[in-house]
Amino acid sequence: MDFKKLINWEQVVQLQKLKALAHPPKDLYYIGNFDPKILSDCIAIVGSRRMTDYGHRVIEKIVPKLVFEKKAIVSGFMYGTDQYAHQVCVDNGGKTIAVLGWGINKKLSGYDKNLAEQIVKTGGLLISEWETQEGTNWTFPVRDRIIAALADEVIVTEAAVKSGALITVRDAIKLKRKVWAVPGPITSKTSEGTNNLIANGTAQMYLGETVQQILTFDNPILSILQNETLSTDEIARKLNKPVPEIGSELTILLLSGKIVERSGKYNLSE
Amino acid sequence: MKIRSIANVGLETVPVDVEVDVAEKGFPGFTVVGLASKAVEEARERVKTAIVNSGLDFPNKKITVNLAPADLPKDGAAYDLPIAIGVLLASQQLLLPKDFNLENCHFYGELSLDGTLRPTRGILLLGLFAQAKRGTLFVPETSANEAGVVENITVIPVKTLKQLINHLLRTEEIPILKYIPPEEIADFHGIEIDLSEIAGQEQAKRALIIAAAGGHNLLMWGPPGTGKTMLAKALPGILPPLSPPEALEVTRVYSVSGMLSPGQALVSKRPFRSPHHGVSAAGMIGGGSNPLPGEVSLAHLGVLFLDEMPEFPRQVLEGLRQPIEDQTVEIVRAAGHVKYPASFTLIAAINPCPCGYLNHPRRECKCTDKQIAKYRHRISGPILDRIDLFVQVSVVEAEKLMLTTKRSANKITSKEAKNQVVMVRKTQEKRFKDRGIYTNSQMKNSDVKKYSQITPDAENILKMAAEKFDFSARSYYRLIKVARTIADLENSTKIMPTHMAEALQYRQMV
């Protein structure tokens, strides 16, 4: 994929927010069709590389809504939370900005390449401040500041105590951006960082849609999946019905798009 | 002097004549010719000492033993007995009664220094070989039971060389081993682990029943300690009992490998083999300079369980492709070319990641995405293509189950499951009687079209799923086969949408 240098980025009105950084990037390179409008209303979604089912569900719940509000999703293109946020955004037809932790000319392969193509196709951008830099341990924290600066608000979906996502949070606070954290179970290591942010007041609690919809279903499987993520065995046990019957119903629900399955567990599709 | 014996090449039996000559002239010595291995060469010392210790003379003359045919490599200590008898006859210490028919007698067994006979492998094959001519067998008493299940032969179980000589001279009669029909001795009902002993895992149990009924290979996927091994061990207990001819078939393999315990007549339980992942390719497929059966053949008509499948060397896993496809293995070595049966149900278990705790509710996984991808890539596509059922086995909180389980809709014992399986196997036998296959899993793609009887609605579901989950053509046919077995379990001649939908629960997910 061809990249271009953004000539005189300092002149772009929508990029003035980068100037607030202690060390603004010298150059900016990008892949995609550059349209400054994408930069006007951005929200960053950051989180752990290793995400749990909960992290997946959080992103599936909040990203479509943000896309609907015509916000661009900014994230770091790393596997885990970053890429999933990009993916859900493009799946919902939204525009997303991937701030790379390496030089723009690096050849992508496999899923990375596939995702990058999807991002460009839906009108998003891949950007980097380097042309040829290798991705290494210092480049990722450094690009985090650009994510924080581009975004007007930052949402942390899942983070352990020592997560890189917290670097973005620190940068965002320096830049006086609004920081949200999604609360998680206090037993989960990958939610410890986010819960701490809420507990010590650094971040506000992000609850997605605050008004909980109460839905009623004819199907008992859908009813019990309303509040829980369950495996086939657990559903069969709860309803005390034979596994073959439950299994075949689950397949039908899955194919009709009413539920989704991830590593053997089911939940309602949002 | 010519004594009849045999050599087992794989599962084939070749007659071997042991010719002994005691020459009056020449320098005293004892030579064995005829492509004898080390073990056969050493027979000289055993035979010499055993004869002396039985109170007879070892002739101080030039003795030549020829094992004919001369170009067939011979291995094992089983020629001790025919050589000893040959020496005694040739040196005229043993004079057989006139009416004794040596032509139809087979001698086979290893001697110990004091003249007793030691357990020797391959006796069942000798029995089956002698069956055609209604021959007589002189074999070690400890292994004689193996031949006891063969009809129309005379088996003389011999304890010592001395006793045999007395028997041949008719001074002491050794009682003939009675023929025992395989049906009578077989204990066909032993169940090691009953399905009802396993808490939870309802879907995995169902998958086991489907696997047993349709002969499908199964892959279980889940963290350590969730009962994958236990589930696999429960499978032999729900497979239909071995029929007597099947039991003989299994016993042949075990007889050749020398894996029958002394006195054991028949392998009557379905084999369950669970080789460790350190196994070599020769150990798995079979091998050695004189090729012996490997794990795939020892699991013949039973279950081959590969725990932590990705840990097995690539070469070993790839070696499984031929036996899974052809249900036999052919081993080619310098010494010869042998064929062993290897019709087994493969049960594989894999952890979700190298550390095993990916998506575990309470423990943290320490693997990187790269490690996980690498781990899963170790199982090649061609092997996964030969597995029909994939099922996730998740962590069960046993104490929770104990409290909440009332009369569950999913409670099933191995006996009930076995009855279902036997019924479905009969249905399949009827379906494929003109086709020469036995189970749904053996259907080729053309058979799937012919025999599956899929309703248009069910096919629509499959097409929808194919689009959503991006199936390969192979997966497509695999799922129809599984759906066919599910329909058989529900006693339905057609594959209904519910059957197809259930089959989709077992689609490939790794």
Image: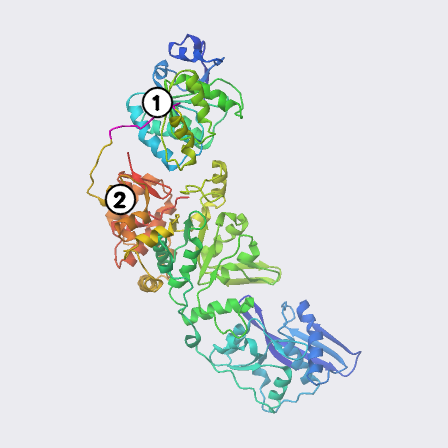
Q: Is residue B329 visible?
A: no
- Which is more N-terminal, label 2 or label 1? 1
Report x, y in % for residue B153.
50, 81
Q: Is residue A260 visible?
A: yes
Helix, strand or loop at disc 2?
A: helix
- Quadrant in which the N terminus of chain A is drawn: top left
Report x, y in % for residue B193.
41, 62
Residue A218 placement, left or right of B275: left
Report x, y in % for residue B84.
67, 80
Q: Chain of mark 2?
A: A
Residue lying at 46% horizontally and 30% vertically, measured from the top left: A161
Assess disc 2: are there few (<14), some (14-19) or many (≥20) residues with their C-alpha within 10 Å of its C-alpha. Answer: many
Residue lying at 49% horizontally and 53% vertically, measured from the top left: B320
With respect to residue B99, does A254 lie above or below? above
Instruction: Using the numbered discs, state the Cα–Cα distance from disc 1 to disc 2 in whole angstroms.
Output: 32 Å
Q: Chain of mark 1?
A: A
The magenta segment is: A201-211
* Dot 1 amino acid type: Lys
Report x, y in % for residue B392.
38, 48
Assess disc 1: are there few (<14), some (14-19) or many (≥20) residues with their C-alpha within 10 Å of its C-alpha. Answer: many
* Dot 2 amino acid type: Ile
User: Observer-nearest residue: A46 or B328?
Assistant: A46
Helix, strand or loop at disc 1?
A: loop
| Residue sitting at the far front | A200
Question: Can you identify the residue that label 2 sits on?
Answer: A252
The label on residue A95 is 1
